[in-house]
Image: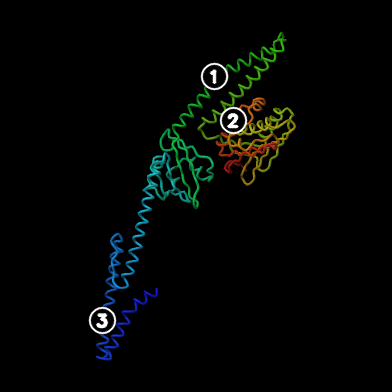
Amino acid sequence: MFDFWQRALVFPLILLALSFLLWGVAGALPAALLFSSGILLRLISHLRNLSDLQRWLDAPDSSVPDGTGLWEDAFSRLNKMTRKQRKEREQHAAALLQLEQATAALPDGVVILDATDRIEWCNRLAEQHFGLDVMRDTGQQITYLARQPEFVQYLAMRSFVEPLVLRDARQEGLVLSINLISYGKGKHLLISSNITQRERMETMRRDFVANVSHELRTPLTVVNGFVETMHDMPHLENEMARRALNLMGDQTVRMENLVDDLLALSRLENDQNPVREDRVDVAVMLSDIQREGEAVSQGKHTIHLNMEGATHLKGSTEELRSAFLNLLTNAIRYTPNGGDIWMLWTNTQGHAQFAVKDSGIGIAAHHIPRLTERFYRVDRSRSRETGGTGLGLAIVKHIAIRHQATLDIASEEGKGSTFMLQFPATRSVG
């Protein structure tokens, strides 16, 4: 700063000194002319440099002027700054190009959304999946362009734990898996995966299971009928034969239960229709389920029912009954004789929850993430002894998904477990 003022004042001070000297020698007029001429020349120099600066500002990609006097230093600094900025822009452009090339190579569509769900950027696959144009649609609300009701509802819920499966998104038969990842200040990264082929394979598998289950149902019913008939024959006195028939009867009943659960699960997986919107009286339903559970338990457990808040829910009566009953019978199977089981219903501030809590054997933490898988059993021998098929929790999970609910599991070995269904506020009825 001192150097600047030193250089800035040198010329005016020298000019002033020469003017005073000339005044003393030749008088005031020549001195005034000398001072005025010097100031004018200095002003012209400044104007010329300002003109050069203006021309450069109009064409910033051209070279920075050299400048004279004080302007030389200013232009030199400006030149260094523009070179640095140009280098940074080139680096940013190269990084952006690499990012675009990387996202273009991804097998998934990528859309960047701001805090108000407006599109900031998307890659080519996302353009194909949603019919977007990054140049045209940047700044648009994504729900203006992707208007499927299930997608709009998913985005509005702001709960992105589970991906959304979007069918017939832009063309018939196209199936997308939508994941939303939060980052920054309210922004979201939307990732869309084409799972059409996987869905076809899953459909083939489900159809196979359903067809096999249907084919097994009739012969199992016939076999079970013959076993019951033979068991009731008056001349059957051989103890070994009776034991064999009892065992055959137990196994055919178990197979029938397995087929029934397979068919129920297949129906849930294949049903693409929206869930029924019955007005379900949960109080009446849970009272019936409590009595049914007591019959299954045969007095070996104490089943409690506690209810708090509104007791009506929108949903499929049949599916909700199946989910609630599955959770209760599951608790009965894994609670030792004499144990307590609680059915808990709460609906406060529009958030409905149903939980089954038991004083059973509990579940090790590493098993919990897999409990809703088909045929996954913590204790296979106990599950078979108690008549479990290994499909109950898978059925509950699918019913929860169809009702936009979540299934939460908490357990501690030796102390018991709690299975909780949490329903969104949109399903509560006052």
| Distance of label 1 from label 2 (alpha carbons) | 24 Å
Query: Which quarter of the rendering shows the C terminus?
Result: top right
> Which disc number belongs to residue 37?
3
Amino acid found under the numbered disc labelled 2: Tyr
> Which disc number belongs to residue 376?
2
In this rendering, position of residue 286 left or right of residue 52: right
Which of the 4 image quadrants contains residue 72? bottom left
Residue under the image location 67 percent in, 25 percent down: 385
* Badge 3 density bin: few <14, some 14–19, many ≥20, Cα 10 Å: few
Question: Along the line of sight, which residue is nearer the eye, 127 or 86?
Answer: 86
Q: Write down the residue under mark 1.
A: 215
| Distance of label 3 from label 2 (alpha carbons) | 99 Å
Residue under the image location 60 percent in, 17 percent down: 221
Q: Position of residue 410 (x, y in %)?
A: 64, 39
Q: Position of residue 271 (x, y in %)?
A: 52, 31
Amino acid found under the numbered disc labelled 1: Glu
Query: Which quarter of the rendering shows the N terminus?
Result: bottom left
Residue under the image location 36 percent in, 50 percent down: 94
